[in-house]
Image (cartoon, rainbow, N blue to C red):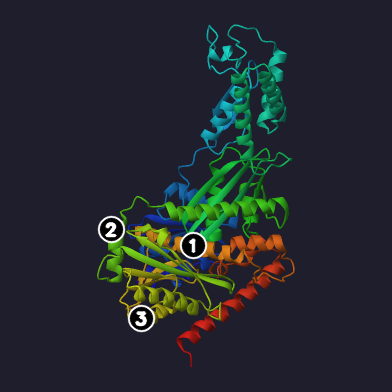
């Protein structure tokens, strides 16, 4: 059904203003199912109905029967209104950080005997606050260490008799001793220094005590000092980057893959990295809107904001700065740029981890039955082989095969192939070589044939697979994993029938296939890196002004294969290199893509 079949939608779309505002999509019962904001209501709302959609947006559009709009005077007002309406109506297609709690703080009592406690309210008088910390467990771990290092009162209510901590030398015992105020002042100052990141005076003291205990043959006490030093070192080691300015700042990084986005906030308090918050959501059609929305929701939950937020996107920086009333920085170089890259790396790692670990509890055998039905196979594909090629922008090509038995990896049966065909940029020719070598061995050695072969490519790769299996006279079902124009896998191809089978991104089968696809990618790229590491190799990044060895390494980490490079954008490349260099990379990528398309065309029609 088209929106043209619904007169109300058709008429309202024709009346949309070219102004900023919020829009509220409604279903057949009049329930608000999605709230969004737009710089231009005309352009933003109309595109839902005139552009092809996938995933969550596709499902939402199928339900829309009406919508309302609220015009605003600025995009900032539209963003804040959007967040307000989301938390009012809880629309089912919106991302909502409803379960977030306030970050915990460590509170130090300002007067009397020093006392530490965890709190999520940093407004109560009579305490000095440190943090916030990303979660309670980290805060309690710090307090536990502090209680061992400093003779702090542990009891909330002072008892009539001294407790065990006094006899262990970990409490001044105000229950029986009259402690001088100057002693308390000195203790509070030491605690403050420690919580602000200065631990050198404590470690020096512990090293001296450990030596004295060892000299006196008091080895148990020496070990206690050693354990404390190890605990301090562990906490220090987790603070990857420290700033001398002691400013509270956050770093917002993200990664996109297979129709999902992972957003990571790295949290720095008083210049020290305390931890990270991670959010993984199905991607809507406008990434910038999603990032803005998520950032504002994230900080609305906090009792205090950082002084600075580091982001990648120049376009959303002014809006976030205006909405949040904090300094939003888009660095082009230096330490802050390195932090942004670290946040992006964290996001990529977490998103990869999500695909590898999500739905592991699913019944894999039932999913293989579902795969059998979708591909109309004669039997359940309990033995699946996946194939992929890897090359570095056309250089040093390799091929790889991984095998899954009963849905589980079988690494002992994996195979590597060094590509020898003369056109390394021709992926179809490389796949033909790999499959020919594999099928030839299967036939000559009369090995058991796999139940299914999955090729990480579209119709061109499937056509090659059909030709090679016919050449060797083997009866093996072949399917392909097809990507859309955003290079996200969204469907299966039944090579034998030519049928395209859409995959729902939130389905259990999709996650199983993504785990398989990740494994063949990992294996092929690992083999390729090992091969190229043994000799000098060329890349499309060579001989570009502004790209030296360090930046080249960063680019290779971010775009390890040609397929990854095809997803590169100008903003994405500018995380690593200047704008001029990023534009030159994109030009070379387009040339490389054209060459590979020509190779594919010629392989189909050699005449």
In the rendered image, the vertical position of residue 478 relative to residue 520, given as above or below: below
Q: Are marks 1 and 3 in contact (CB under 8 Å)?
A: no
Q: Residue at x 41, y 63 (%)?
A: 55
The outermost residue toward the front is: 445
In the rendered image, the vertical position of residue 267 relative to residue 47, given as above or below: above
Q: Nearer the viewer, residue 171 or 427?
A: 427
Residue under label 3: 472
Residue under label 2: 366
In the rendered image, the vertical position of residue 538 relative to residue 212, given as above or below: below
Label 1 vs label 2: CA separation?
26 Å
Q: Residue at x 39, y 63 (%)?
A: 403
Q: Nearer the viewer, mark 1 or mark 3?
A: 3
Q: Is residue 406 left or right of residue 21?
A: left
Considering the image in quadrants, where does the N terminus appear? bottom left
Circle 2 — which element?
helix
Label 3 vs label 2: CA separation?
32 Å
In the rendered image, the vertical position of residue 122 relative to residue 346, given as above or below: above
Would you say residue 543 is visible in this rendering?
yes
N-terminal of the two: label 3 or label 2?
Answer: 2
Q: Position of residue 448 (x, y in %)?
A: 31, 69
Q: Position of residue 54 (x, y in %)?
A: 42, 66
Q: Residue at x 66, y 41 (%)?
A: 248
Would you say residue 493 is visible in this rendering?
no
Label 1 vs label 3: CA separation?
26 Å
Circle 2 packing at 10 Å, graded few (<14), some (14-19), many (20+), is few
N-terminal of the two: label 1 or label 2?
Answer: 2
Q: Nearer the viewer, residue 247 or 125?
A: 247
Q: Position of residue 476 (x, y in %)?
A: 32, 74
Residue under label 1: 523
Q: Residue at x 59, y 6 (%)?
A: 176
């Amino acid at each position: 059904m088209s929106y043209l079949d619904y007169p109300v939608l058709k008429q309202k779309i024709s009346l949309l203003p070219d102004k900023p505002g919020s829009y509220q999509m409604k279903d057949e019962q009049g329930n608000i199912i999605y709230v969004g904001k737009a710089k231009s209501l005309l352009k933003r709302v109309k595109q839902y109905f005139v552009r092809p959609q996938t995933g969550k947006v596709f499902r939402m559009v199928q339900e829309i029967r009406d919508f309302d709009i609220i015009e605003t005077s600025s995009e900032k007002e539209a963003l804040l209104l959007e967040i307000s309406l989301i938390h009012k109506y809880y629309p089912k297609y919106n991302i909502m950080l409803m379960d977030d709690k306030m970050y915990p703080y460590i509170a130090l009592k300002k007067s009397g005997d020093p006392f530490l406690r965890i709190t999520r309210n940093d407004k109560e008088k009579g305490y000095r606050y440190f943090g916030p910390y990303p979660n309670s467990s980290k805060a309690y771990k710090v307090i536990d260490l502090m209680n061992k290092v400093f003779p702090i009162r542990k009891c909330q209510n002072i008892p009539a008799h001294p407790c065990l901590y006094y006899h262990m030398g970990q409490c001044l015992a105000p229950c029986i001793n009259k402690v001088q105020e100057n002693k308390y002042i000195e203790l509070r100052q030491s605690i403050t220094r420690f919580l602000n990141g200065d631990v050198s005076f404590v470690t020096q003291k512990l090293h001296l005590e450990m030596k004295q205990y060892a000299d006196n043959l008091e080895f148990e006490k020496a070990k206690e000092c050693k354990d404390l030093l190890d605990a301090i070192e562990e906490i220090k080691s987790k603070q990857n980057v420290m700033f001398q300015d002691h400013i509270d700042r956050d770093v917002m990084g993200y990664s996109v893959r297979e129709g999902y986005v992972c957003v990571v906030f790295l949290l720095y308090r008083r210049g020290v990295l305390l931890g990270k918050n991670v959010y993984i959501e199905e991607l809507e059609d406008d990434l910038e809107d999603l990032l803005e929305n998520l950032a504002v929701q994230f900080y609305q939950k906090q009792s205090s904001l950082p002084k600075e937020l580091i982001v990648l996107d120049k376009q959303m920086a002014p809006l976030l700065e205006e909405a949040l009333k904090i300094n939003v920085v888009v660095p082009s170089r230096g330490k802050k740029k390195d932090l942004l890259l670290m946040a992006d790396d964290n996001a990529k790692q977490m998103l990869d981890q999500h695909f590898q670990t999500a739905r592991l509890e699913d019944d894999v055998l039932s999913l293989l039955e579902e795969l059998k039905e979708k591909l109309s196979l004669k039997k359940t594909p309990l033995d699946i082989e996946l194939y992929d090629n890897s090359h570095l922008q056309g250089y040093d090509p390799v091929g790889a095969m991984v095998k899954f038995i009963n849905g589980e990896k079988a690494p002992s049966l994996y195979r590597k192939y060094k590509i020898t065909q003369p056109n390394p940029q021709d992926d179809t020719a490389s796949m033909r070589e790999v499959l020919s070598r594999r099928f030839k061995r299967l036939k000559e050695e009369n090995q058991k044939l796999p139940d299914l072969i999955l090729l990480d490519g579209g119709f061109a790769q499937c056509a090659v697979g059909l030709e090679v299996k016919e050449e060797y006279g083997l009866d093996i079902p072949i399917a392909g994993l097809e990507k859309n124009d955003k290079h996200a896998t969204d469907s299966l191809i039944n090579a034998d029938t030519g049928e395209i089978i859409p995959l729902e991104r939130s389905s259990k089968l999709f996650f199983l296939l993504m785990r398989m696809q990740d494994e063949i990618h990992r294996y092929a790229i690992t083999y390729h890196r090992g091969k190229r590491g043994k000799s000098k190799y060329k890349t499309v990044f060579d001989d570009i002004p502004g790209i030296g060895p360090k930046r080249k390494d960063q680019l290779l980490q971010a775009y390890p294969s040609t397929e990854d490079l095809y997803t590169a954008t100008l903003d994405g490349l500018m995380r690593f290199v200047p704008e001029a260099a990023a534009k030159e990379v994109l030009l070379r990528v387009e040339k490389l893509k054209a060459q590979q398309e020509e190779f594919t065309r010629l392989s189909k029609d050699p005449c």
